[in-house]
């Protein structure tokens, strides 16, 4: 160790943690890393040779290497491991030190840890970090929550490390306690929706006869247009990848069963608690569940003689419809996520600023997209916007996509190509833009069987009828 005055400490030296430390050091800060695994510590020393980096397996050495107040970030799996690391740290840290959780922790856990650490005189920040291992190395998007003055103490490191868009860092203080983890959770919910939507678009185009090479070209072109986004970009790369083990493309060899770690599900669960509809995200979570029932699906495919579906469309028409629908559904998915964030902000007193959130999502994170600059502008013009779909610019944008989106979804319905997340987006839109819904009948039924009462359209009051 060259000194005991290191600026930044990080616990958890997996690829993500090591990359984060290397990024910190590249930006002129000295950094220490801790991991129980000797190989990971050695990997840090190898990768960080020549940089102001120190790695150790010993917690005493690690803590002693940091200047006070110490800044210690954990990049360990969410759940119990975070509590374990906090317990391991507590005997070694001092009042005023700052512990940061950079994982995908549940917001309730973050609130609990914040109070617990506060009662021990330790400051705690929950900072959602997005961008994967590459983002950690080259510039992630980061979503900090906690006390503002504590964030201010570490902001120079985080702003230096973050991705930049037009010179602006993709990190900014978001709100108290679990605000950062909540925003990251909804980021992941939107991520689930966009991934599912892209997968459905792929299914539609494949059922229109496009080969993997053609799909790669389509997604490359889309990435140069209004759909420009990280997920579209990597999808183009995926279609180009040849399989090492067979003659075909790798994508065709991958089993169609999706895993999940929970952030999408938490987003849906909490949206349900708040009564906020986010059907694009709900459907994406549902489809991960349905995908995992592979055996049942195979049996049902046989039982119903489904075989292979075809849209019957020409390739150019299929591509045009799919592009419009994906743009429509992208807008609707961000819209749903942001409505949820604003509702949670009120419920949990996060005081979130949707323009700031859109701004730090423009680069570094998994849901980064050209569209986010337009979203940022819409909220900058009107911070109390109730739904992105009501922003004048978006009314025009969405109107331009509707007829193709309807044709895209109806073609899928007619030919048995499941497009559930796209359909959820369109139904959400159709319902949200309906001044009158058939829910008067639901109210009548509730009153009929359970005397639950109803309101009327033509006069004030609560009514009940003996039906
Ligand atoms: C990110 C990602 C990251 C992680 C997802 C994967 O922003 O960098 O969201 O946090 O890859 O949580 O989630 P699932 O395993 O649930 O798909």
Image: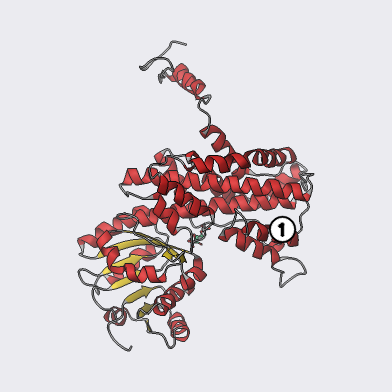
Residue 124, image x, y percentages: 29, 63
Q: Is residue 208 visible?
A: no
> Residue at 78% across / 52% down in the picture?
209
Residue 326, image x, y percentages: 62, 48
Q: Secondary structure at mark 1?
A: helix
Q: Is residue 50 visible?
A: yes
> Residue at 43% across / 63% down in the picture?
170
Q: Is residue 124 left or right of residue 379?
A: left
Q: Count all numbered tags in the image, as a single digit.
A: 1
Residue ID for mark 1: 215
Direction top: furthest residue: 466
Relative vertical location of residue 336 with respect to residue 128 in this rendering, above or below: above
Q: Residues within 10 Å of mark 1 (few under 14, many from 20)?
A: many
Residue 229, image x, y percentages: 57, 58
Relative vertical location of residue 140 with respect to residue 437 in this rendering, above or below: below
Residue sitting nearer the eye, 416 or 136: 136
Residue sitting nearer the eye, 48 or 294: 48
Colouring style: secondary structure
């Amino acid at each position: 160790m060259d000194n005991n005055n290191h600026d930044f400490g990080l616990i958890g030296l997996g690829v993500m943690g090591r990359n984060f430390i290397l990024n910190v050091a590249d930006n002129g800060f000295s950094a220490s890393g801790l991991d129980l695994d000797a190989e990971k510590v050695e990997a840090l020393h190898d990768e960080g040779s020549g940089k102001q980096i120190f790695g150790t397996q010993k917690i005493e050495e690690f803590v002693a290497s940091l200047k006070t107040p110490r800044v210690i970030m954990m990049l360990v799996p969410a759940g119990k491991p975070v509590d374990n690391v906090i317990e391991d740290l507590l005997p070694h840290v001092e009042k005023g030190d700052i512990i940061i959780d950079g994982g995908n922790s549940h917001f309730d856990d973050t609130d609990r840890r914040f109070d617990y650490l506060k009662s021990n005189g330790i400051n705690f920040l929950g900072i959602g970090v997005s961008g994967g291992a590459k983002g950690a190395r080259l510039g992630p998007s980061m979503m900090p929550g906690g006390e503002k003055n504590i964030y201010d103490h570490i902001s120079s490191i985080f702003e230096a490390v973050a991705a930049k868009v037009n010179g602006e860092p993709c990190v900014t203080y978001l709100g108290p306690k679990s605000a950062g983890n909540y925003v990251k959770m909804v980021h992941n919910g939107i991520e689930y929706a966009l991934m599912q939507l892209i997968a459905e678009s792929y299914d539609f185009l494949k059922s229109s006869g496009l080969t993997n090479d053609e799909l790669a070209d389509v997604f490359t072109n889309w990435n140069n247009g209004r759909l420009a986004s990280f997920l579209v970009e990597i999808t183009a790369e995926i279609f180009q990848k040849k399989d090492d083990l067979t003659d075909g493309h790798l994508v065709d060899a991958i089993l169609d069963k999706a895993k999940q770690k929970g952030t999408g599900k938490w987003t849906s669960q909490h949206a349900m608690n708040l009564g906020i509809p986010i059907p694009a995200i709900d459907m994406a979570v549902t489809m991960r569940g349905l995908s995992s029932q592979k055996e049942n699906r195979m049996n049902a495919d046989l039982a119903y003689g489904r075989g292979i579906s075809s849209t019957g469309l020409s390739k150019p028409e299929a591509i045009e419809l799919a592009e419009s629908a994906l743009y429509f559904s992208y807008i609707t998915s961000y819209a749903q996520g942001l409505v949820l964030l604003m509702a949670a902000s009120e419920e949990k007193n996060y005081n979130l600023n949707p323009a700031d959130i859109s701004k730090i999502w423009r680069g570094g994170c998994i849901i980064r997209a050209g569209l986010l600059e337009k979203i940022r502008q819409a909220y900058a013009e009107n911070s109390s916007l109730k739904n992105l779909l009501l922003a004048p610019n978006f009314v025009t944008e969405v109107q331009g996509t509707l007829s193709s989106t309807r044709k895209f979804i109806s073609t899928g319905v007619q030919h048995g190509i499941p497009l559930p997340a796209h359909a959820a987006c369109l139904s959400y839109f159709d319902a949200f833009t309906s001044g009158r819904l058939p829910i008067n009948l639901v109210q009548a039924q509730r009153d009929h069987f359970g005397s639950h009462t109803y309101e009327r359209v033509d006069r004030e009051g609560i009514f009940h009828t003996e039906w």
